[in-house]
Amino acid sequence: MLHALAPRVWQVPAADSDASAANRGRVSNLLLVHAQDRVWLLGSGPTAAAGRALACVLRRDLGLRATDVVSPWARPELVLGFSGLRAAGGPALRHWAHEDVAKAMAERCPSCVQRLAQRLDSARDDLGADPVSLPTELFGGSSGELGPFRWWRFSRAEAQTVTVWRLQTAQGAIWYAPGLINGSGPGDARDADIAVLQRETLRLADLARADGATVRYLGEQGPVADAGAAAQQARYWQALLEAVRAAMEAGQPETAPPRSWPGLPPAWARHPWHALNWQHAWREAEVQWLEAPR
């Protein structure tokens, strides 16, 4: 269940798909770091049951107990495991989040829990009786430091905050960027603005460039990605928007299969999220066309 990335640093791997009964909602990578006398988790998992299971794995395989959990953005599959970790770790477990993320969780988590329960189907009882545990340790601003990490505030849409985390290791910097990077294909544009995603992934690439070729990214799903991952994702969003506009100008119907283009990896073109991203980009382009002055 744990994959070592560096000494005292582990990935808790996610399934490469959407939440379902089969994967029990474990579709967002978590990052585990043992720094000095603290054990940090970026993300907590999708359900109370997943949180309890992760706590058992930490005790069994590493002899550790989580002390600090960060909720990086308001994605239920990433933040609803805290209640299970707390039940296993005791009241001293601290729950951190950017104040914008905490606000979004308070506003959106009740409806998001319902959506996740539908996806989990027969595994919906994993959510527990009280799925939502809001962060109590808040921080604000555009960037800062917390424990062994440096963090930055990013966006997936103008009013949707996601935090990105940098950890320095002996092998180089690891950037944890759920919601912006995906290690197994294109990113997921659902509930986001593609123009904002393009801008923010380009900003991430610029920030990480100072760390050189040893940079590794851990994204929403998939294994760690290399130093070119953020720039590649930014190019994908830009090319997607351009391809959709070209298809609209050529009179292609919205129901036609999504286009490919030179430089798009074949695995990305076949990925289910590419088809969803195409539909999302089409809707965004239609709104812009309707709102444009005549």
Image: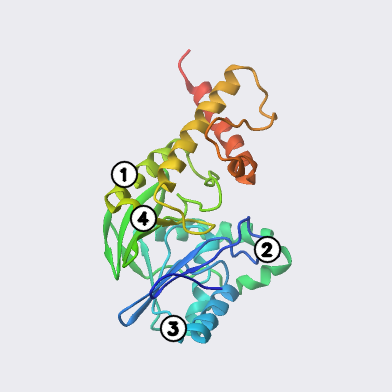
The residues tagged by marks 3 and 1 sit, at their Cα atoms, a distance apart of 35 Å
The residues tagged by marks 4 and 3 sit, at their Cα atoms, a distance apart of 28 Å
**Callout 3 amino acid:** Arg
Q: In this view, does 290 lie above or below 15?
A: above
Q: Which of 257 and 91 is in front in this view?
A: 257
Name which of mark 4 and mark 3 comes first in the sequence. Answer: 3
**Callout 2 amino acid:** Leu
Q: Quadrant of residue 37?
A: bottom left
As helix, strand or loop, the secondary structure at mark 1 comes to helix
Q: Which disc number belongs to residue 196? A: none
Q: Which of 20 and 158 is in front in this view?
A: 20
Q: Residue at x 43, y 38 (%)?
A: 198
Q: Which disc number belongs to residue 215? A: 4
Q: In this view, does 190 lie above or below 143?
A: above
Q: Which disc number belongs to residue 120? A: 2
Residue 275: x and y in percent read 63, 39
Q: Which disc number belongs to residue 206? A: 1
Q: Which disc number belongs to residue 65? A: 3
The residues tagged by marks 4 and 1 sit, at their Cα atoms, a distance apart of 12 Å
Label 4 crowd (10 A; few <14 / some 14-19 / many >=20): many
Image depth: mark 4 or mark 3 in front: 4
Q: In this view, does 109 lie above or below 127?
A: above
Q: Which residue is drawn at 51% across and 30% down?
A: 241
Name which of mark 3 and mark 1 comes first in the sequence. Answer: 3
Residue 116: x and y in percent read 62, 60
115 sits left or right of 33 in the view: right
36 sits left or right of 32 in the view: left
As helix, strand or loop, the secondary structure at mark 4 comes to loop
